[in-house]
Image (tube, rainbow, N blue to C red):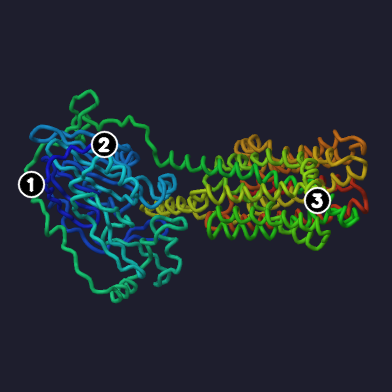
Amino acid sequence: MAGTSATTEQIPVRALGGPTALFEYGGLRFLTDPTFDPPREYRVPGGRLTKVAPSRAAPDDLGRIDVVLLSHDEHPDNLDDAGRALLADVPLTLTTLGGGRRLGNGAKGLADWEPVELDRPGGGTVTVTGVPAVHGPGTREEVEPITGQVVGFVLTGDGLPTIYVSGDNASLDLVGQIAERFGPVDTAILFAGAPASPSSSTTRSSSSTAPRPPRPPRSSAPAGWFPSTTTAGRTSPRAVTNCWPPSPPPGWPTAWTSATPADRAASADRRPARRRRPNPASMISSAPDAAPRRPPHRRDRDGGAVRAGLSKEHPPVTNTVPARTEDLSHAQVQRRILIVLVAAQVLSGAGLAAGVAVGALLAQEMLGSTGLAGLPSALGTAGSALAALAVGRLSQARGRRPGLAAGYLAGAVGSAGVIAAAVAGNAVLLFLSLFVYGAGTATNLQARYAGADLASPAHRASAVSTVLVATTLGGVVGPSLAAPTGDLAHTLGIPYLAGPFLLAGAAYAMAALILAIWLRPDPLLLAGALEAERTAAEAARPGDAAGRPGPAVEGHRSLLLTGALVMVLTQLVMVAIMTMTPVHMHDHGHGTGASGLVIAVHIAAMYLPSPLTGRLVDRHGRLTIAAASGLTLLAAGIVAANAPSDSVTPLVAALALLGLGWNFGIVAGTAIITDAVPLAARARTQGLVDVAIAIAGATGGMASGLVVAAAGYPLLTIGGGILALVIVPAAVATARSR
């Protein structure tokens, strides 16, 4: 759509400070983002926002306001308390779709490119079109869940110049799209900002006029505003992660940073002399016209006029364009995160299962001892313990994306090392590589937490199960490819039993690549931002803090211990029985194809029931399903102990029950841990819990070979089932104590 401008008329604009400006256009008086509070501090997620300069006018001094153009309503530097009170006296406020719903009567949200026609006092119409804007660098999908929606405006009319009001927009691409539709633009009112920080001496006026749309600002901070996050009177050295927008992802600009008054004074002393730009208010002004005029009218789709007043008889026109709301954006982000995690889990499942199927057999062949056949599993789970700690800490500090990607990359390196050790016949290199290879196992488990980061408490188990079930496909395919990859390895001159590690290395590397590229925005960082926003909103409610009960610390600690116990025991029992089952089958004449089938069914049972398990946990409770996991593991041990040595079917059933019991325990335990741990320490605590899980797995893997060598496979399976029964009284005791 081309602009309708046919004049070079300059529009008088009165800059009032920050993002607030008053201008007259087509006989109507427009006000942008009203901010009239005196200098003060606001509590915002992650710190404080400080206004250091007053507005150049009070609302009562402005005269009649016909329309407020509000870029967004969620931040106090764009709509403060005094500005919000002013809206009640303004016939029409145009804003974001979400803002239109929140503000209610008199407010209308505009979708991208949606026009609204306003009747001019002397005849004719003014068209205000909502234009896209992004409140920070990046795509809307990345930015909006953190900073919320924002909208810009283009004003056109017959015989009138074209005006662009940028709002808090930081996207050059969107400015280009706006210029294509409406250019040439005669006047641009830009929210350029003047951020102040110890490391920045740049200042820009908050509103200006220009004959053509200039480059949008790098920062959307209005003049006279900066966040202040201090610790005991000193600037926090990591304040950039505790500012507005909350918890910005890596790579975001640091125009919003922390500063104390002393920091600002020092920064001013270091600032080089520069020419002062003229104050726009002294160059262009518009005398307020106090004479009352009728409020503007908005034309409906049938061509009739609808008054944009505040009366019940004339409510704002209901928007019919599908809204991309904050909630929808949140749901879209969660869906995107789950899709990426599912893709990575399919690949990592193949890498995990391939090594499990032949790891013990490879060690037995290289070492010539059944008693040490459980050593690969022990080393892998020991490496998994260290990796769980590292991935958890890295995720807490940097987010899930770098943590998970690094873990899978380490698994790929370990796979390559196993192949090299098999070729060289080097047992020391084999053990070291199996230790590193365990990082893939830890990361595969840690990914389930990422699925729950943005999920509501009522749906956390279902989110965890979605990630877990994705491992099924790879877990089933991996062991089934043991024979083909062994043949491929033999063709390449690699020992037959090292073949599955070719698949494992490639699968882990691809999983790392997928997460590094597409797991954006980071779910843990985004969850932290949303949690900080909720906390700040609750703290801002008058009288709420005094009446709110404190957290039940002891109850949380009890839940944490129970959740950890459930997952530790299920992992120990599962690893011990699973590790020695292929060895037991091999000793009784079964080939790698048969053992691969048993392990494939087992891994399918570990992950495939996850959607059902998630629903059961969310519906019937975490502790109920945790107790069911202990009973199921006992049943698995009994079936395995009584399986005839020459029959595969009973072992298939036993390993299926073993996988199902593990699934019950992991899904329920993960939900318990996530419920019990606050977000600020969630990833680190989850990593520590997974360390305990990995140590338990290492213990089970190491002890399993010794137990089988000393007492036989049936005793191992029965003993494991009895040990799993400890979960039942622990779950019952925790339920009674709540």
Residue in view at x 87 percent, y 35 percent: 648
Q: Is residue 271 above or below residue 521?
A: below
- Earlier in the chain: of badge 1 and badge 3, it is 1
| Local crowd size for mark 3, using a 10 Å CA cut-off: few (<14), some (14–19), many (≥20) | few
- Decide if residue 467 is on the left or right side of residue 23: right
User: Would you name the residue on which mark 2 appears?
Assistant: 105
Residue 82 seen in the figure:
no
Locate residue 91, reporting x and y percent.
19, 38
Q: Which mark is residue 493?
A: 3
Secondary element at tag 1: loop
- Earlier in the chain: of badge 2 and badge 3, it is 2
Which of labels 1 and 3 is toward the front?
3
What is the C-alpha distance between the residues marked 2 and 1?
Answer: 25 Å
Q: Which mark is residue 289?
A: 1
The amino acid pointed to by label 2 is: Asn
Which of labels 2 and 1 is toward the front?
1
Which quarter of the picture shows residue 141?
Answer: top left
- Decide if residue 505 is on the left or right side of residue 199: right
Residue in view at x 53 percent, y 49 percent: 517
Q: Which mark is residue 534?
A: none
Closest to the observer: 436 or 334?
Answer: 436
Residue 210 seen in the figure:
yes
The amino acid pointed to by label 1 is: Asp
What is the C-alpha distance between the residues marked 2 and 3?
Answer: 76 Å
